[in-house]
Image (cartoon, rainbow, N blue to C red):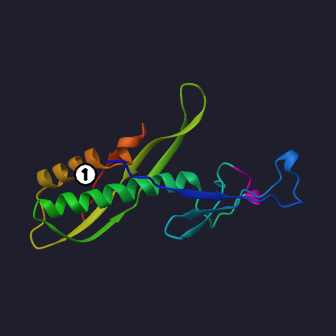
Amino acid sequence: MVHLYTATTTWHRDPDSDFAHGRYSRGHLWRFDGGMEVPASASPQVVPKAYAHEAAVDPEEAFVASLSSCHMLTFLDVARRAGFVVDRYEDAAEGVMEKNEDGACWIARVTLRPQIAFAGAPPDSAQADDLHHRAHALCFIANSVRTAVQVVPTAS
C-alpha cells in the first residue's frame, strides 16, 4: 500500500528586508491538498520575534500536533475495535527541543497527555494502558520518527 501526501510551502522576500543580515520575515504559508491554507513561521523561540509571526504555526508546533493527532486518531480506532465508545479526547501535548550528540537541535521528546471521556463503562487502567500502547505502536507518525514519544494519560 502506497499513499502520497503533499503540502506546498510558499515564502516571498519583502524587497525592503535586509536578507543578507538575517532581517527578513520568516512568515510563510502551508497549503494542503484539500485546499486548507495555514499561516506558518519560524518559532519566536528560535528566530527574533521581529522576524517570526507568533500567531502562525511553527514547524516544531506542527510536529508535536502531528504526533498528538496521529495518536488520537489511532487510539479512537483501537478503542472502538475493543468495544469502547469515546465521547471526548483532549491532549495537552508538549515537545522539548535539545541539542543532540553532534550539537544540532532536534525535538528530543514529545509527551502526550490525553484526557479521555468514555460513554458507558471506561476501560480499567490496564486496558487503557494497552489501548495507548497499541495506538502508539500503530501510529504512522510515531513510526516515522526517532523522537522519544511518551504517552501519559491523565484522568478526566
Direction from residue 152 to residue 8 in the image, left or right: right
Query: Which of the 4 image quarters holds residue 93?
Result: bottom left
x and y percentages locating residue 78 in the rendered image: 19, 57
Secondary structure mostly seen in the magenta stretch: helix
Q: Name the element at disc 1.
A: helix
Total numbered labels placed on residues in the image: 1
Residue lying at the far top in this picture: please name it. Answer: 102
**Label 1 neighbour load within 10 Å: few <14, some 14-19, many 20+:** many
Which part of the image, by quadrant, shows the C terminus?
A: bottom left
| Whether residue 156 is situated above or below residue 51 in the rendered picture | below
The amino acid at mark 1 is Ala
In this view of the protein, which residue sits in the foreground, 127 or 20? 20
Magenta extent: 47-51
| Residue at the (54%, 25%) spot, across then down | 101
| Residue at the (58%, 69%) spot, across then down | 37
Direction from residue 70 to residue 102 in the image, left or right: right
Which residue is labeled 1 in the image? 135
Residue lying at the far front in this picture: please name it. Answer: 1
* Magenta span includes 29: no
x and y percentages locating residue 58 in the rendered image: 59, 56
x and y percentages locating residue 119 in the rendered image: 15, 74
Direction from residue 25 to residue 103 in the image, left or right: left
Query: Which of the 4 image quarters holds residue 28?
Result: bottom right
